[in-house]
Image (cartoon, rainbow, N blue to C red):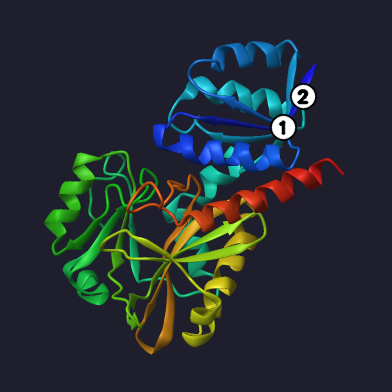
Amino acid sequence: MTKYDLAISYVWEYDAEFVQLIEKIFQENKLTTFLISYHNVEEVIEKLRNKELHFNAYLDRASDVDSDYEPITQILKKRHAYLINPHKRVHKFTNKSYMHRLLSKKNVDIPKSYILPAYYFDHSLKITEDDLYKIGIPFVIKPAIETGGGEGVIIDAYSLKEIQKVREENPKEEYIVQEKITPVNLGNHRAWFRVYWAFNRVIPAWWNDLTHKYEVVTKEQIEKYKLEPLFKITRKLAKYTRIDYFSTEIAVAQNHKFYIIDYINDQCDFRLKSNHADGVPDEIVIRFIYEMKKKITSLKK
């Protein structure tokens, strides 16, 4: 049986640069990697079933969009391989309605929100004009599950009619109607952050919610703008979810109040800023990979 330290599956073309960087860093540190994509997925599944191949750890960035990759996880789970972000936990904690209910019970600040059932199961709106005035107009409408990178999110909604129209267009999706948080300015930045949890480390980034462009948060800025709550909040999320990596969106509003805007995103976009104007700063991606390397190395001890 041939064994590798880490297998990575992916289908998104823009993941290629991220995967290549993982391979480079891992191989420089004497860790073996194996790539799985459309050209070899069937062969890999066959070899796994025949016990010709084994992976100590598996990073799955494919099966959420292509079910052909699901048998890999099933086989590796039975063989006690380390599954990065196990599907069962990810499915639970990336559900925004579930996370809203969970966080509402915890000592964290989240926008005022109403959770609406899927139109398919309940046509009634269960929200009133008075409710809208309580959260403020305009407000945000976002799908509870089928979302990523802002997909499907309406950031300036004004009426019950808009809510019902979205529910009818996606009848099997739950929706969250959420207070719109306006961030303060800190220096020349909108105080909106995408914060990464990377295997036991918090990595914050400035993320402009209007332009979707990133910048590194420096140690000096953390101290100057009192950004320590970004770390505390993200560690809390990691404790609640117990998954290996995710990103969360946090905004700082008036009175230096930190709100979790978007709770848990597991399939983080790791396009490099050196190649894409709205990509993640290269040093953040590299830091993430080194944290993953530390985790995979620990499995060998």
Foreground disc of the pair 1, 2: 1
Tell me which residue sits at (73%, 10%) in the image. Answer: 50
In the image, taking residue 132 as reference, residue 116 lies left or right, namely right
Task: Name above or below for residue 216 compared with residue 67.
Answer: below
Q: In the drawing, does residue 59 fall left or right of residue 173?
A: right
Residue 36: percent from the left, percent from the top?
56, 24
Amino acid carrying mark 1 in the image: Thr
Report the amino acid beneath label 2. Answer: Lys
Q: Which residue is mark 1?
A: 32
Asked if residue 127 can be seen in this view, the reply is no
Q: Quadrant of the C terminus?
A: top right
Tell me the residue at 70%/30% (across/down).
77
Residue 260 horizontal/vertical position (percent): 44, 68
| Residue 245 picture location, percent across and down | 58, 52
- Residue 3: mark in rendering: 2
Q: Secondary structure at mark 2?
A: strand
* Quarter of the image that includes the N terminus: top right
